[in-house]
Amino acid sequence: MPKYMWNNQDITLDILMKTEQVVRILSEKLKKPFDEELKDFYKSRTFRALKNTQSEMWAESAEFIADEFERE
């Protein structure tokens, strides 16, 4: 797994935790299994933006990111 850095700080754990929170929100809302929703999220533009530390999406709330995914 790659490390995600922002301002010389390792934010890998932040991104992993945010991913889990977002997928949990989506799987509950859409009534889909967590694993299935995780696969869908990994394929999304929203996840690519989340991993792009320059976008600073990782600093947004999980709810905001879930909404972005749904708008995709």
Image (cartoon, grey):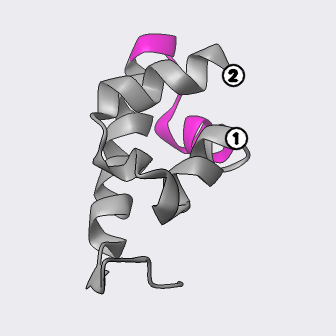
Which residue position is annotated with label 2? 72
User: What residue would you read off at disc 1?
Assistant: 44
> Residue 72 falls in which quadrant of the image?
top right
Instruction: Identify whether 37 is placed above or below 13.
Output: above
Q: Residues within 10 Å of mark 2 (few under 14, many from 20)?
A: few
Residue plotted at (44% across, 77% down): 4
Magenta: main secondary structure equals helix
Residue in the image at 58% along x and 27% along y: 69
* Visible residue check, residue 27: no
Image mark count = 2
Q: Which mark is residue 66?
A: none
Distance CA(mark 2)–CA(mark 1): 8 Å
Residue drawn at x 58%, y 35% as measured from the top left: 37
Quadrant hosting residue 6: bottom left
Q: Are marks 2 and 1 in contact (CB under 8 Å)?
A: yes
Front one among 36 and 10:
10
Going by the numbered disc 2, the residue's amino acid type is: Glu
Q: Which residues are magenta?
A: 29-39
How far across and down, in percent of the image, does residue 12 sit?
Answer: 36, 74
Amino acid type, residue under disc 1 in the picture: Ser
